[in-house]
Image (spheres, grey):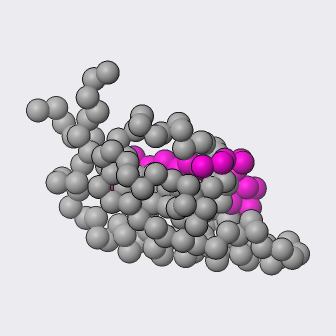
């Protein structure tokens, strides 16, 4: 039997500009190479500059972050854990996805929707970053034994 690959985690949001990008970067940071982590959007609009700023403030690597459409992964990546982080994506995303073992809905407020001065907007991004990091920490604690949790390789096409 071929070796099993790491479990694939996909964070999904509407714009793939803030919350899902934070999830992707924060899980990589927290879990190292235990997971194959990605993010996507149902209507991607680019990575928000404050997303990058608050991740870097926390010492999280932002290299390679880019806004991606869900179609880049749907049916092409053996997603094991789908984590939806906004209401819009929860409504727009298929509820059944072949191979997904766990579809989670972790709603977080959209920091890019916060109006006000620069300090208020930056504070909103930091608050959401910290909330996502806390949720990821709790989730990772429950995923310690990955041997039985690995995603089998995709069948040859």
> In this rendering, would 154 be left or right of 50?
left
Residues 76 and 26: in front is: 76
What residue is rendered at 33% in x and 45% in y?
98
Left or right, 97 with respect to 124, comes to left
Percent across and percent down for residue 62 are: 61, 51
- Percent coordinates x, y for residue 51 in the rendering: 68, 60
Quarter where residue 122 is shown: bottom right
Residue 37 part of the magenta segment: yes
Point 46% across, 67% down: residue: 105
**Where 79 sits versus 137, above or below?**
above
Considering the image in quadrants, where does the C terminus appear? top left
Q: Position of residue 63 (x, y in %)?
A: 60, 45
User: In the rendered image, which quarter is residue 151 located in?
Assistant: top left
Numbered range of the magenta stretch: 32-53
Q: Residue at x 35, y 67 (%)?
A: 140
Q: Residue furthest right?
A: 117
**Who is closer to the viewer here, 34 or 135?**
135
**Figure quadrant of residue 56:** bottom right
**Does residue 13 appear to the left or right of 103 in the view shown?**
right
Tag count: 0
* Residue furthest left in the image: 1
Q: Is residue 24 visible?
A: no
Q: Position of residue 1 (x, y in %)?
A: 11, 32
Left or right of 114 in this view: 104: left
Can residue 14 be seen? Answer: yes
Q: Is residue 47 magenta?
A: yes
């Amino acid at each position: 039997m071929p070796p099993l690959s790491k479990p694939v985690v996909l964070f999904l949001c509407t714009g793939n500009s803030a919350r899902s990008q934070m999830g992707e970067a924060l899980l990589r940071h927290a879990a190292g190479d235990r997971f194959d982590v990605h993010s996507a959007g149902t209507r991607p609009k680019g990575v928000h500059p404050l997303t990058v700023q608050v991740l870097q403030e926390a010492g999280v690597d932002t290299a390679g972050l880019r806004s991606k459409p869900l179609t880049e992964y749907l049916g092409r990546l053996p997603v094991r854990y789908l984590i939806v982080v906004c209401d819009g994506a929860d409504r727009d995303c298929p509820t059944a996805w072949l191979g997904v073992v766990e579809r989670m809905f972790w709603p977080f407020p959209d920091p890019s929707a916060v109006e006000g001065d620069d300090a208020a907007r930056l504070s909103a991004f930091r608050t959401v970053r910290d909330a996502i990091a806390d949720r990821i920490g709790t989730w990772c604690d429950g995923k310690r034994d990955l041997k039985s949790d690995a995603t089998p390789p995709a069948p040859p096409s």
